[in-house]
């Protein structure tokens, strides 16, 4: 949407855990935590409780109320089976990197 320069100016970094947050909206109606489900390397479904990295993306979603702002926190965790770093899959309701959800894009 031609917002790359503006978006970079609004990004914050947290050095404790790798957290990158780009502020795009004035409010957040709901936060969804996305955790990895299984390790693609060894197949184990157990991960560390504390993420080593969190990616944050705010998305405007079309819902019963006109629009809801959802902030997704995608966790990257260490696999208990093999030590692999695994990021959670993004929600199917969003296009990573875009700030409008797929239902709202279809409506737009």
Image (tube, rainbow, N blue to C red):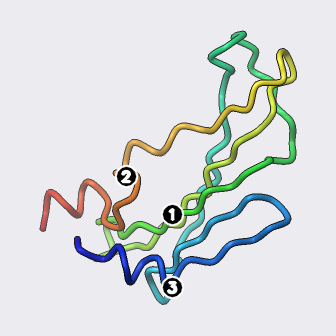
Question: Label 2 near label 1: C-beta < 8 Å?
Answer: yes
Helix, strand or loop at mark 3: loop
First in sequence, mark 3 or 2: give its number. Answer: 3
Specify the quadrant that holds the N terminus.
Answer: bottom left
Helix, strand or loop at mark 1: strand
Relative placement, left or right, of 29 versus 61 is right
Q: What residue is at 66 percent from the left and 28 percent from the top?
A: 37
Of residue 17 and residue 46, the one placed in the foreground of this image is 17
Nearer mark to the viewer, of 1 and 3: 1
| Residue count near mark 1 (Cα–Cα under 10 Å), binned few <14, some 14–19, many ≥20 | many
> At which x and y percent is residue 95?
34, 51
Task: Please tell me in which quadrant of the rendered image residue 3 appears.
Answer: bottom left
> At which x and y percent is residue 7?
42, 78
Relative placement, left or right, of 103 versus 7 is left
Image mark for residue 67: none
Give the labeled residue for mark 2. Answer: 94
> At which x and y percent is residue 57?
51, 63
First in sequence, mark 1 or 2: give its number. Answer: 1
| Residue count near mark 2 (Cα–Cα under 10 Å), binned few <14, some 14–19, many ≥20 | many
In whole angstroms, how far apart are the C-alphas of marks 1 and 2? 10 Å
First in sequence, mark 1 or 3: give its number. Answer: 3
Q: What residue is at 44 percent from the left and 80 percent from the top?
A: 24
Residue at the extreme front? 5
In whole angstroms, how far apart are the C-alphas of marks 1 and 3? 13 Å
Task: Please tell me in which quadrant of the rendered image residue 40 appears.
Answer: top right
Q: What residue is at 84 percent from the left and 24 percent from the top?
A: 83
Give the labeled residue for mark 3. Answer: 27
Q: What residue is at 53 percent from the left and 37 percent from the top?
A: 89
> At which x and y percent is residue 52?
80, 47
Image mark for residue 57: 1
Helix, strand or loop at mark 2: loop
In whole angstroms, how far apart are the C-alphas of marks 3 and 2? 18 Å
């Amino acid at each position: 949407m031609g917002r790359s320069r503006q978006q970079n100016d609004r990004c914050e970094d947290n050095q404790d855990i790798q957290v990158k947050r780009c502020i795009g909206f004035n409010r957040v109606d709901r936060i969804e935590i996305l955790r990895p489900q299984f390790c693609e390397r060894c197949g184990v479904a157990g991960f560390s409780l504390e993420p080593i990295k969190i990616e944050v993306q705010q998305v405007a979603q079309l819902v019963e109320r006109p629009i809801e702002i959802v902030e997704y926190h995608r966790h990257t965790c260490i696999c208990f089976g093999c030590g692999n770093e695994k990021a959670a899959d993004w929600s199917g309701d969003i296009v990573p990197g875009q700030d409008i959800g797929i239902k709202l894009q279809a409506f737009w």
